[in-house]
Amino acid sequence: LQTEFKANFLAKHNEYRKKHGVPEVTLSEDLCDSSQKWADHLLSIKTLQHSETSNGENVFYSWSSKTTKPTGPEAVEKWYSEIKDYNFSKPGFQPNTGHFTQVVWKDSKEIGVGLATDGNTIFVVGQYKPAGNVANPGYFEKNVLPAGASTSCF
């Protein structure tokens, strides 16, 4: 499960990143180890929260009364769906869009993923290096490009 889950998680990131004309990310074992430790911790305390990492981080939580088998893309799809709330004409950190902007952040090169589940509760942790969502002037304009940004044929 873990190998397939990681591959699907990575593929979904790169599918979305390609839409925004930014380079693919690669899977980092160090980031996977760190993400896995945090996902295991979250499952043990059954609480959704961020770690103290200096890397970028997205956290996903799901609960179902039925036993579910996570496949990888669902967390990334949920994070990416925040695009609907992002205003590209006013780039910058915006409420409820930080997961989306981290997924497509141009300067992030590596990702790691951790999955922890007891069958009903699922925690997925994605960590990114270098971290996205840097609020320095001009950083969002440079790193969060509209879909089709550099693939358009004008």
Image (cartoon, rainbow, N blue to C red):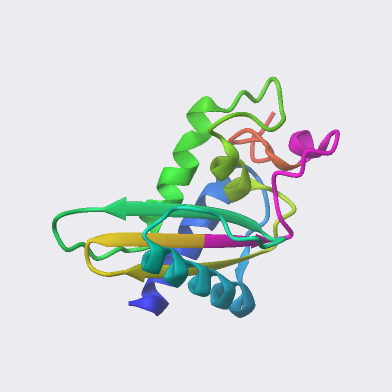
Q: Residue at x 59, y 62 (%)?
A: 127
* Residue 132 on image: x %, y %: 70, 49
Residues in magenta, as a range: 126-142
Which image quarter: residue 90?
top right
Examine the structure image and report whether residue 34 is included in the region drawn in magenta. no
Q: Is 134 inside the magenta-drawn segment? A: yes
Name which quarter of the figure residue 120 lies in. bottom left
Which residue is at the far right? 137
Q: Position of residue 54 (x, y in %)?
A: 72, 60
Q: Position of residue 88 (x, y in %)?
A: 65, 25
With 15 as the anchor, is 56 left or right in this view?
right
Residue at 30 percent across and 63 percent down: it is: 70
Which quarter of the rendered picture does the C terminus lie within? Answer: top right
Q: Is residue 23 above or below residue 95?
A: below
Q: Nearer the viewer, residue 151 or 66?
A: 66
Relative depth, front residue between 21 and 34: 34
> 75 left or right of 101?
left
